[in-house]
Image (cartoon, helix red, strand yellow):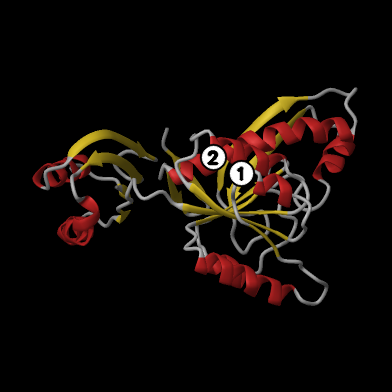
């Protein structure tokens, strides 16, 4: 159960008492308050409740009056079945390969159901893992048709999360609106710094001393969605733009994989254009 609401006394008690009354065993509970007594309160409760899948509507209905009284935005997320993931990629395979490896090794709780690309280059790598690969070319003047084909694939595949693993196409607002809070992108710099194309060249020309990467949710605002995770590595004046790109690729793959894992484990709460990520 993930909850956000105005902070006040009694929230934890109300949630705990409700779950106890339902026969649930609380496994873990995490809370965060922006400003005690007057800010926002966030809560993630992991619990075990037999036959929850069958009782989900009943449990949600019983909790609704409590949620209304405490002005909660909340959702009940099931640990099973695993969320279905579609990975969109262009020609660079480092982020995709990291996700495929973690998926194969059981480190991702979700199921990579398909890979969609506007190029055919990475088909052999994907098919080695037994995952369907779909090539949908984005031809000049025909972007809308390509997006329609992509959306049809995602809908037919029951996709819960879309991951842009260096997918070098800008999604339309209509596409983004179909998956609010369910599209994750990796950007190879610190947003909002060096947004747009060729950020490593921008970073080199600016003389930066730290290279980083940012994983964020996609919104209609280009590279402006809520940030999920970032990481850094130091560089020096001896590193050229290609050196920075090589270092950056290593950061990109781990940052994106962490962000995807946290989403699949329901550890992220959206708060405006920010995120609360529970460890």
Q: Give whichever of discs 2 and 1 has the lower sequence position.
A: 2
At horizontal 58% and vertical 39% (from top left) the residue drawn is 257
At horizontal 88% and vertical 26% (from top left) the residue drawn is 239
What kind of element bears circle 2?
helix
Instruction: Decide which of 143, 63 is in the foreground and name it.
Output: 143
* Residue at the outermost left position: 21
What kind of element bears circle 1?
loop
144 over 244 or under it: above or below: below
Describe residue 179's horizontal placement relative to residue 44 as left or right.
right
Q: Which residue is mark 1?
A: 129
Q: Which mark is residue 103?
A: 2
Describe residue 24's horizontal placement relative to residue 244 as left or right.
left
25 over 162 or under it: above or below: above
Name the quadrant containing residue 206.
Answer: top right
At horizontal 16% and vertical 42% (from top left) the residue drawn is 24
At horizontal 49% and vertical 48% (from top left) the residue drawn is 111
Name the quadrant containing residue 96.
Answer: top right
Residue contact at pointers 2 and 1, CB within 8 angstroms: yes
Instruction: Decide which of 25, 244 is in the foreground and name it.
Output: 25
């Amino acid at each position: 159960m993930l909850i956000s609401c105005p902070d006040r006394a009694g929230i934890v008690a109300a949630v705990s008492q409700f779950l106890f009354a339902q026969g649930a065993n609380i496994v873990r509970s995490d809370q965060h308050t922006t400003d005690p007594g007057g800010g926002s309160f966030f809560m993630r409760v992991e619990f075990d409740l037999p036959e929850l899948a069958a009782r989900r509507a009943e449990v949600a209905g019983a909790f609704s009056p409590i949620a209304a009284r405490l002005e909660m935005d909340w959702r009940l997320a099931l640990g099973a079945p695993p969320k279905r993931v579609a990975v969109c990629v262009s020609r660079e395979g480092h982020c995709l390969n990291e996700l495929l490896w973690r998926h194969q090794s059981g480190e991702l709780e979700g199921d990579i159901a398909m890979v969609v690309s506007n190029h055919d280059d990475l088909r052999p790598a994907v098919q080695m893992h037994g995952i369907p690969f779909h090539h949908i070319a984005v031809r000049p003047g025909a972007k809308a048709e390509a997006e329609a084909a992509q959306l049809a694939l995602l809908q037919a595949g029951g996709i819960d999360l879309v991951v842009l693993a260096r997918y070098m196409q800008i999604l339309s607002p209509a596409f983004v609106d179909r998956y609010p809070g369910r599209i994750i992108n990796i950007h190879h710099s610190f947003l909002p710094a060096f947004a747009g194309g060729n950020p490593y060249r921008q970073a080199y020309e600016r003389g930066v001393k730290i290279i980083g990467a940012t994983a964020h949710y996609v919104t209609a605002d280009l590279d402006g969605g809520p940030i999920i995770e970032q990481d850094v590595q130091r560089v020096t004046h001896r590193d050229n733009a290609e050196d920075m790109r090589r270092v950056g690729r290593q950061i990109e793959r781990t940052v994106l994989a962490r962000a995807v894992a946290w989403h699949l484990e329901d550890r992220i709460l959206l708060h405006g254009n920010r995120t609360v990520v529970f460890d």
